[in-house]
Structures are given as C-alpha cells and as structure tokens.
Amino acid sequence: MLAATAIVAVAVPALVVTHPPAMPQPHKRVVLQRRVVPPAELPPVEPVTFIDLTPEDAKAFNAGVPFSDLPNPAARPFRFVGDAEDRARATDCMAAGVLYEAGDDSEGERAVAQVVLNRLRHPAFPKTVCGVIFEGQERSTGCQFSFACDHALTRWTPTADAWRRAREVATMALGGAVYRPVGYATHYHTDWVVPYWQASLDKVVAVHSHLFFRWTGWWGTPPAFNRQVSSSEPVIAQLAPISDAHKMGGALAEADAALLEASAALGLVAPDGVAGETAPFTASAADGDSFFVTLPWGVQPELYPTIAAKACGDRKACRFSAWSDAAKTPTAAPLTADQVAAMAFSYIRDRDAGLERTLWNCAKYPRPDRRQCMKQQVLLTAVPVAAVTPTPVATPVAELGGVRRKGDAVARGNEVPEATGAKRPASAFPSASSSARRLPMTSER
C-alpha cells in the first residue's frame, strides 16, 4: 500500500507537468486612440475601414466598450419639404438604405432611418437624403453605407412586400416620425466588426446586433445638428431597377444627350434637335438597323437597355452594340477580335422571329443572372491556301491475256506506240514528295 501510494504521488505530478491542460487564450487586446474633436474643428468623415479581428474577438471587444452615461435626448422631428418628384426620390433612397442595411426588420430600419436624418442635419455630411445614403458610391470600397458600393443592388432584389414596408418606414421618417433610442447617433456598425473610428465616438445604444454611436463633445449635442438641408434630391442610377422615381429625369436625359453627342461625333447617329437635347435617335450605321456607339461616361449598366431601346426606336429589327472605350468603338463591320472582346453591351431585336435579347460583358459588369452575360466569341481568320492543280491520273487498263507477239501495236496500261515519240511516265500516281498539299481544316464556335 505504501509503495502504491508513493508511485501515485510521484506519477500524477509528473504527468501534469509533462502534459499541462489546455488553457483558454485571452482575446486579442486592441487599443484605440480616443480623441474629442473641439467645436472649432469640423470632425472628418472617414471611409469605413475595419480592424483585423475575428468575429469572436470583435464581439468580445465590443462587449467591453461601455455605453455612455451622458444624456441621450431624442432627435427633433424632421419633415421633408420639396415637390412630389424630389419627395419620391428621397423616399426611395431612404427605403433602399434602411432595407439593404437593416434587412426586413422594422425596428432596425427605423434606427437606420434616424441615423440618416441625423447625418442630414449635421454639417459633416451631404445635405440631401440621397446624398447621405450614397456618399462614396464612386469608390469600390469605403463608402459610408456598404450596400452602395459592394454591388448589393445587383446581387439581391427585394420582394414587393419588403420594398413596400421599407417605403412605409421611409415615408414616416420623412414625415416627422422619430426613433427615440438612437438619439443623435450618426454612426453604427454590427457587433462582429470594429471600425477604426469607434474609439472617437460615444456608444449610446444597441438595436439587435447593431451598435449606435454619436460624436463626443459638442459635435454630438443637439446644437450641432443645425445645418439647413436641401430638398433638391439627385437621381441615383443604381436605384433605377427598383425605383420608378430614379428611372426617368436628369440621369437618363444626360445619358441620352451624351450618347447623341458621342454618336454624332462618330457619324453614326444624328439627333433631331440641337446637341444636348434629348431628341430621339433618327439615323444609324450603314445598313440602317445597326448601331456602333460609345457609352456615356458615368451611366450605370442597368440603364443600357433603355438607351438601346431609344436608339432602335420602332425598328422591327435592330442590333445595338456598345463600347465603354471610344478608342475601341468600331465605325464599320466586320469587327476585329479586340473589338469583340472589348464590347460592353449588346442589344438584339428581331420582332418577326420573336427575338429580343440584352447581353452585358460580365468581365466588366457582373450580372446576377449568368444568362445575361455575353459568351466568349472567337473570330477565325481565313488562311489563304495556294491553289493546287491535281496531276491527271490515267486509269490503268487490265492487261489482256495471251501472248504478245513482236510487232504488236496495242497499248498496254499507260504505254503508247513508239511512233508518237511520247515517253512513258515514271509513275501514274503522285508520290509523297509531290506538290499536292493537304487543305487545312476549319471550325466555327
């Protein structure tokens, strides 16, 4: 017994020392610099960049950030003042913002709408609803609302019910409704990321998985939100597929004018009116039913079919081919391989055959439906082949039986009478070294 106890007393500590139990790793420590912007300095609005943390580490870090214990007053009601067209644009911009940022969640949508209105009144942000929501949309990354520059609008289309509910939230927000818990928050993020700007703001509230922040110091108090807003809402081409208010108006007019000007400069189309007016297309390329045009700069790919339809007008058959690079836009057929590869958009119409097709170059403009993508085209160039004159081949004659006698003048095979003076050829069939060539095989894809 004593021996066994002694062995256990020695073996167990030795086992623990040689095989220590796994200890939980502490979360990565992140230290962010905190800075309060003085009233004399307008706080900068940085593009959204994140600290490199795993979602678990980010959640642990965010949970350790305390909520501000300062008062959190509700924002003043906001009421949109503008004509029906501007109100429709503002409503759809707000609806897209709340739906794509918060999903089909009414409380989250109301919280996001309140942040948009707070930014609208703050001097550090644009002074229109659409300007606030689509700020930075020209960048591929770093926009203020991620859906505006990550192609979310082309990857997902909301259902009719979800879009209706989002527009109801937007209408209420623009009509004076206030979401009180958010207060004067101007920033928010999900709890599984940590933006660099977080340390310079006060954490005021959490709504589901979103955390809301306001600026520290004077810039986060009600007197700072005193900027006069504008009711002249811009047209956002990205919203054209889901918003009637953004399909017509300035953007399409500018696109038509630019397309007319560019096409007229190439001698391909001629507008009915003066340059810059939105007159319909009345002329085309050589055959009257084909267009080779350079697309206007800045027009969203979703508007290309509308431009093509305007160019084709009432023609029963029409082919509209467009390039984004004027240097690669052809002036006549046939097209080179480089011109085919550089084509950005194609529209084909043949009403007699029941055909109407729109295709994009998905290498330039990714589409959610691959059936809308152009197939890779290969142009085969014909290789000239030297003409070959075949060597006449005489048909051999079967040799007659019997005995040939001296003085016989009957020709055998390719032999001829010696009286003609002709010589017998060495061979009746061309050899492998003859001048005959094998014709190349061609294929079409």
Image (spheres, rainbow, N blue to C red):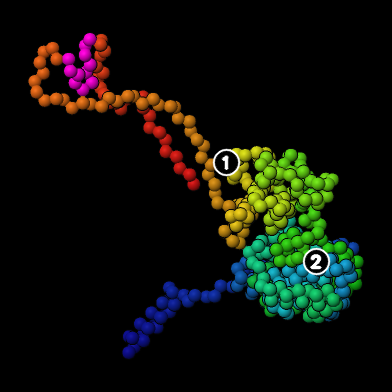
Task: For label 2, count other residues whose C-alpha is less than 10 Å away and answer few (under 14), some (14-19) or many (20+).
Answer: many
Q: Nearer the viewer, residue 351 or 194?
A: 351
Q: Nearer the viewer, residue 402 or 2?
A: 402
Identify the residue at horizontal 61%, vertical 54% (top origin): 352
The x and y percentages for residue 267 are 74, 39
**Depicted 250 relative to depicted 199: above or below:** above
Q: Is residue 256 left or right of residue 344?
A: right
Residue 194 is covered by the magenta coloring: no
Identify the residue at horizontal 71%, vertical 66% (top origin): 242
N-terminal of the pair, mark 2 or mark 1, is 2
Residue tagged by mark 2? Answer: 89
The x and y percentages for residue 251 are 78, 56
User: Is mark 2 in CB contact (under 8 Å) with mark 1?
Assistant: no
Where is the N terminus found, in terms of image quarters?
A: bottom left
In this view, the residue farthest toward the bottom is: 1
Name the image quarter holding residue 161. Answer: bottom right
Identify the residue at horizontal 44%, vertical 27% (top origin): 386
Name the image quarter holding residue 331. Answer: top right
Q: Which residues are magenta?
A: 409-419
Q: Amino acid at mark 2?
A: Arg
On the question of residue 117 being in view, the answer is yes
- Secondary structure beneath dot 2 equals helix
Residue 412 is covered by the magenta coloring: yes
> Which mark, by number, is residue 430?
none
The x and y percentages for residue 222 are 88, 74
Q: Nearer the viewer, residue 389 or 330?
A: 389
Q: Main secondary structure of the magenta part?
A: loop
Identify the residue at horizontal 40%, vertical 83% (top origin): 9
On the question of residue 347 being in view, the answer is no
Residue tagged by mark 1? Answer: 337
